[in-house]
Amino acid sequence: MPSLETFEQTFWERHSNPKSGWSRVLVLPALLYVVYHRNWRLAVAVILFTAINPLLFSPPKSDDAWMTRVVLAEEWWTEEHEQSILGFSYPNVLNVLNILVTGYAFVSAYRKQPVRAILSGLASMILKFWYVGSLVHRYDRKRHS
């Protein structure tokens, strides 16, 4: 039986395929759509896709793709660098802000306020890209030093 460590390694390797990362970008808009339209069957499908997505793709052949380095940087940040993803220091504060903005997006979708849901969903995605972009920048500097 594979160990938890083996599973984690497989998870990170497969999740670092850029197809995994880029397809997960669509999860937040899909979930906001689900909440807005109260389509709970689609909610189950989106959540199931989110859960199995990192295992759907084979490991990438190289780490040239930016999205591959996003996942490698997240792993480096949390595992090797032993940092939390939440906190009040940069860049973790971006995730703290993102929780608030995403919560507002879901409340707006639930209240059927489409403009607010779309704008706060977009702000959430910008915060996430800012966060992972910062991690990639740090990861690339470490790799090339």
Image (spheres, rainbow, N blue to C red):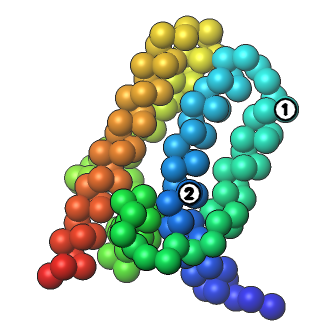
Can residue 82 be seen here? The reply is no
Instruction: Return the x and y of residue 137 as percentages of the image width and height.
Output: 23, 61
Residue at the outermost right position: 41
Direction from residue 113 to residue 33 in the image, left or right: right
Q: Nearer the viewer, residue 145 or 36?
A: 145
What residue sits 43% from the left and 76% below the top?
Answer: 62
Instruction: Return the x and y of residue 61 as percentages of the image width and height.
Output: 50, 77
Q: Quadrant of the C terminus?
A: bottom left
Tell which circle, 1 or 2, labels the residue nearer the N-terminal end.
2
Q: Nearer the viewer, residue 144 or 122?
A: 144
What residue sits 70% from the left and 26% below the top?
Answer: 34
Q: Nearer the viewer, residue 16 or 8?
A: 16
Question: Three-letter amino acid code at disc 1?
Answer: Arg
Residue labelled with disc 1: 41
| Quadrant assignment, res 71 | bottom left
What residue sits 42% from the left and 19% below the top?
Answer: 119
Check contact, mark 1 vs mark 2: CB within 8 A: no
Q: Secondary structure at mark 2?
A: helix
- The answer to whether 131 is drawn above or below residue 65 in the figure is above
What residue sits 30% from the left and 60% below the top?
Answer: 135
- The answer to whether 56 is drawn above or below residue 124 in the figure is below
Q: Gap between marks 1 and 2, in whole Å?
A: 24 Å
* Mark seen at residue 85: none
Residue at the outermost left position: 145
Q: Which callout, 1 or 2, points to the residue nearer the camera?
A: 2
Alpha-carbon neighbours of circle 1 within 10 Å: few (<14), some, or many (≥20)? few
Question: Three-letter amino acid code at disc 2?
Answer: Lys
Q: Secondary structure at mark 1?
A: helix
- The answer to whether 20 is drawn above or below residue 42 in the figure is below
Residue labelled with disc 2: 19
